[in-house]
Image (tube, coloured by chain):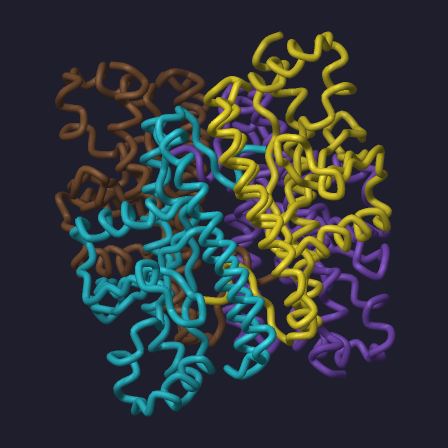
Chain colours: A purple, B brown, C yellow, D cyan
């Protein structure tokens, strides 16, 4: 497929990502305006690169024509929370929105992956408007705590480096780290209630 | 002091913060362009609010005329790293720059505060250009890991809520959390070398 | 009305403005990706300040409870085009979108205001999603050329200074300027067709 | 030359552009904070693309090793003003800054180019800090009114399309347009004094 055709395909996905970043960031503002604690700490997003799409298609034996249907994370939104409880609050907010429809959910927090990976994944259908008319897309929303994100970021780099074959001794380190994060998230949850009513926003950006 | 006068005083500090965010973000780009690992993960900054400045001045018995000299964190930059080792790499980069002069350094990582707080603090002198000419300012640069930042953010909220008198049982939770972070940072350090040579940037934003 | 209540009212309008800026900017990108000329050159937006809203309510004798219904420019989007013809192309694009519904249109280009003001105004209904559910808002979209915008900006400043009573000699200058802009826009329209097929984007930002 | 090497060369120029955009935008803020009229309306910047650099090098017979010395617009800043008089005010501000040194100035406003092009060009030396140490670069600063910018943008597109050979009948249209802009700028200058003291900022963004 030509690069120009790829760009045409991916273009609406980048629009979806930009719109959703604006929308989820606005939720943070809505909470802060009320002077209350926001369950969302940070929102990021990306469109999958062409090479990652091709790699995934090959690995999963997906025909080029089925890519948009079968690869459901071409558009990805990541929502970072401070506490584990916040994740379920965010899931609840997403479930009640009328501008997106949930296709599926996976709770890798309750049921951690063998590797130690934890996150909540939601696939939604979301409509964007293009010059050719309206188009319905799939978007993957990943919700996780700062600590889970830190772990996943590092594991991703190692997967990339070792092409899925991470050596045993490193795998063990990752496991211990995942363990420490479980403890950290648990200790922090206890103080969460103490913070919930604080009339004060405490974002990465704001509170130096 | 009138609000207009305060704005005039704080204006150059906000310029300094904006310039330094551009400069430190460019360091991330420099590393990535070379295809190598960046010791800086994220840069944020802020100018202290007027009310925080007044509060600090009162607490430390500082006369209004001495504020700019004696309050050295009116402009604040925060640099977030992935690994403890990265912090010292960043300190080294700052020491070698010719566009800022180090006034003082405090290593709260080697020597953790009693509360559990860990971070590396540097006060620098930095020149900005205003319509009235050049002006030398003090800027505080805080360098810490993601996990240390998470802890400090939560502790800050609790300090704010309890006006410095955090109850004992919460203080204990914060201590356990600080402990878990120490372990986490230690486990992660071991895998750092594995990642250093990966031809791949792994930022919060980029690697979904 | 309390400031906190005002913020609650205005909050969804700022979300609408942010979403629409993303959406109209994406149209520019869609054209450029295809390598063709974009009828939109620049998109800006703003939410009316509380004091402007109050002033308008007083002047037009609007009760506080009717403000959201009767003041239709609380949220404002401005679309800047290079050529007069582009304005009508943009109007056409807006008419065909399914994510907004046109309430009314006013063509002050065909029918210039006495002052010399020229612009195309569209009021649309647009839905945003808040924590309390979905909300339908009015948004004013102003479409004009760069030259018309320049004139309107200056006239606005003079209106503001003279509180609607611009002295006669200045009013005359504004008229001559409006005349020069009419000529300019006409001369430029002739070269528009020459540019339409150029495989090159020529934005304020891009082409130095 | 390899793409990687080009990136290494161009990297400091993009840093310079980003720093200067922050600095010139801050001048706007300084004026607005004082509640007075800003001579700068808008600031943009760009780094020349590799292909444009190569094209210029070939056309002017510049050896690859001399590119950084002889091509003085690799980094470009464009400052847009509302009135012709503002341009000279901005030139004056630049002359008095201590963070850049003027290498040369060209006044194409007093002395319009044959094509009708008008702008004030300044080449400055500006220092940036890289991981390898400090580096002195050349930056071209173009200062012009909104109307001049409009004209130059369109002429640039036509130059690009006709590869420098714009047909005579189009050239004539451009001349008439340049004429209309001269008149427009003259009429507007008269009202400038009226605006100078208005306690109100009137930017493209702010005054809808």
Q: Nearer the viewer, residue A39 or C120?
A: C120
Name the residue at 27% across, 88% down.
D65
Total tally of numbered discs in the picture: 0
Judged left or right of residue C157, residue A127 is right
Name the residue at 57% across, 50% down.
C146
Judged left or right of residue C32, residue B99 is left
Q: Nearer the viewer, residue D41 or B103?
A: D41
Q: Is residue C186 above or below residue D136?
A: above
Q: Quadrant of residue B168?
A: top left
**Residue A144 in view here:** no
* Quarter of the figure that contains the N terminus of chain A: bottom right
Q: Nearer the viewer, residue C44 or A136?
A: C44
Residue C103 in picture, x, y percent from top left:
84, 33
Q: Nearer the viewer, residue D160 or D66?
A: D160
Residue D111 in picture, x, y percent from top left:
32, 64
**Residue D20 in view here:** yes
* Quarter of the figure that contains the C terminus of chain A: top left
Q: Is residue C116 above or below residue C84?
A: above
Q: Is residue A22 above or below residue D3?
A: above
Name the residue at 57% across, 23% down.
C49
Residue C203 in picture, x, y percent from top left:
55, 61
Q: Quadrant of residue D118?
A: bottom left
Residue A173 in picture, x, y percent from top left:
49, 62
């Amino acid at each position: 497929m030509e690069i120009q055709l790829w760009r045409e395909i991916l273009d609406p996905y980048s629009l979806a990502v930009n719109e959703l970043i604006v929308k989820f960031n606005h939720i943070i503002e809505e909470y802060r305006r009320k002077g209350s604690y926001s369950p969302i700490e940070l929102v990021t997003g990306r469109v999958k690169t062409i090479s990652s799409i091709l790699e995934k298609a090959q690995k999963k034996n997906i025909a080029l024509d089925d890519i948009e249907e079968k690869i459901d994370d071409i558009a990805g939104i990541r929502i970072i929370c401070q506490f584990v409880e916040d994740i379920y609050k965010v899931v609840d907010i997403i479930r009640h929105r009328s501008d997106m429809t949930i296709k599926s959910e996976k709770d890798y927090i309750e049921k951690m992956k063998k590797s130690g990976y934890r996150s909540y994944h939601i696939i939604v259908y979301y409509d964007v408007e293009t010059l050719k008319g309206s188009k319905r897309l799939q978007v993957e929303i990943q919700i996780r705590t700062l600590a889970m994100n830190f772990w996943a970021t590092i594991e991703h780099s190692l997967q990339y480096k070792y092409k899925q074959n991470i050596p045993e001794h490193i795998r063990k380190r990752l496991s211990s780290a995942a363990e420490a994060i479980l403890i950290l998230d648990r200790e922090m949850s206890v103080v969460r209630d103490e913070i919930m009513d604080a009339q004060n926003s405490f974002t990465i950006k704001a509170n130096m």
